Amino acid sequence: MVCLVNEHTKIKFYVSSAMLTVLGTVLGLVISFRTTSAYDRFWEGRRLWGNIQLAARNLGMIIWIHVPLDRKAIPGEHERSRPDRQLRAIIERKSMMNLIQAFAVSVKHYLRSEPGIFYEDLYPLVSFLPQNIHGNHSVPTPRESSEDSEEKGNDEMSLPMWNDSRNNTLTSKHPKKRSRKGTFDPEGVLPHIASAVPLRPARNPPSEHVTDLIPFLVVFKPFGDLFRKMIGKVRHERDSGTRDWFGKKKDLTPIDSNVPLEISLFLSSYLQMLLAQNLLTPAMATGYNNALVSMQDSLSNLERIRTTPIPFAYQTHLRLSVWLYLIFLPFEIYTSFKWLTIPAVLFAAFLYLGFLEIGQEIENPFNYDANDLDLDHFCLSIQRELAEITAHPAPDPNSFIFSQWNQPFAPADRRTATDILHERQQHEEGHTEQAVIHGVREDLLKSYREIIKATHHRDTQGAKWFRNDS
């Protein structure tokens, strides 16, 4: 419009560039600060998920390696055979490993404001936990949980994770299962446990709205909502887009129960049982507790990021300032750009609004946006690592150290561990213990010198070798 008026009329629309130049510089600094603050939250979320992954790995190794299989009979119980006690210990440890995995999955759903435990990737891992304060475990039918709960008082006796998830799941519309690409189905390897309550998919992203793809179209959203009401088309609240009429992303629904906290309580009670039965040394008990505390600390910090957004007044004022700057920008640059004012303003709008949108999108990096953290990937990584830990039987180190496949003193001594011990026994009379140890130390020193020589030669000639190979 500015170009048309200036070119085809006698009216001249332009302003001095001094004011907008100063405003542009200030806006650039403020937008940079806004984007940097949002990225700091994004990176802190990634770091905290790394802490959860590390703590889960350490806790899993402590449970699988340091909790013994051989246990004494508990007074008052009937005598069990040794294989039976070992089998029960393995089942016990694997169940706790499943709870570690369930903690990570529950954190994912908790950060996405998805209440309860009735999900395809969570319920199979926690289905064996008690459902009420009496320790009972019985899943009522949907009719019982929705109609007869008040008469029987089940909701008052249920633990929070079961009570919250049952109410929220039954009173909301069950979404259709979203198919995965190809044969990728990580939930298929989880336990197959029947549930009276329909399980939601592992991923429940809201339906995308046109204002999510093109944010500035939000100004037309009130007219679209009015039109849908006029024709009687009412959609579910979760599918009505993720932004309000002002372009701000909607706040996530608060959750009554903290499922990750409840799972950590069961992991803590397992530590108490191990200590009561003297099944864990004090050092390993400290490591167990430190790993659990690290998981809880990460959860608290993730919750802080999720529940503390950038103040809306700051976002609104910044966005309004950017729009005013872009509106007056053509009046400033027309005298220099003429018809090129149109693409120049479009390019400036792309830059300013793009940075604003990036800052708003990664401000809460736990949702389903393309630029959010891949929480599902983190949970699957923890699942693979815990499965890798349980795949190892934790044998006696003597069974694999002193074998013919181990050359401990290479490169100075290429003999295997069994050969070294065998020759030591044959020449035991002719050599003193000090002479044998001295010979081993000489081999270690010789190995050090050979390794230093070989690796330094590689470093100095590496670039030359690389050029010749290429």
Image (tube, rainbow, N blue to C red):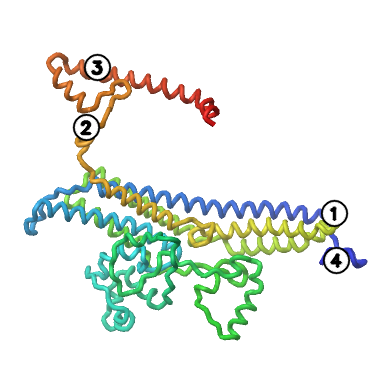
C-alpha separation, residue under disc 2 versus residue under disc 3: 23 Å
Q: In which quarter of the image is residue 377?
A: bottom left
Residue type, label 4: Leu
| Above or below 96: residue 428 | above
Residue type, label 2: Ser
Residue type, label 3: His
Q: Which of 411 and 18 is in front in this view?
A: 411
Q: In which quarter of the image is residue 106?
A: bottom left
C-alpha separation, residue under disc 1 versus residue under disc 2: 82 Å
Task: Measuring from the top left, give residue 464's x and y in whole percent.
Answer: 53, 25
Q: Earlier in the sequence, mark 4 or mark 1?
A: 4
C-alpha separation, residue under disc 3 versus residue under disc 1: 86 Å
Horizontally, is 376 left or right of 290 in the view?
right
Q: Residue sitting at 59 percent across and 57 percent down?
A: 359
Q: Which residue lies furthest to the top in this view?
A: 430
Task: Measuring from the top left, give residue 117's x and y in whole percent.
Answer: 35, 67
Q: Which residue lies furthest to the right in this view?
A: 10
C-alpha separation, residue under disc 3 versus residue under disc 4: 95 Å
Q: Determine which residue is flagged by label 2.
A: 403
Horizontally, is 349 left or right of 200 in the view?
right
| Number of residues whose C-alpha sits closer than 10 Å to that of mark 3, classed few (under 14), some (14–19) or many (20 or more) | few
Q: Which of marks 4 and 2 is nearer the N terminus?
A: 4
Q: Determine which residue is flagged by label 4.
A: 4
SS at mark 3 in the image: helix
Task: Measuring from the top left, give residue 50's x and y in whole percent.
Answer: 42, 49
Q: Which of marks 3 and 1 is nearer the N terminus?
A: 1
Q: Residue sitting at 85 percent across and 58 percent down?
A: 338
| Residue 344's disc number | none
| Above or below 330: residue 425 | above
| Number of residues whose C-alpha sits closer than 10 Å to that of mark 4, classed few (under 14), some (14–19) or many (20 or more) | few
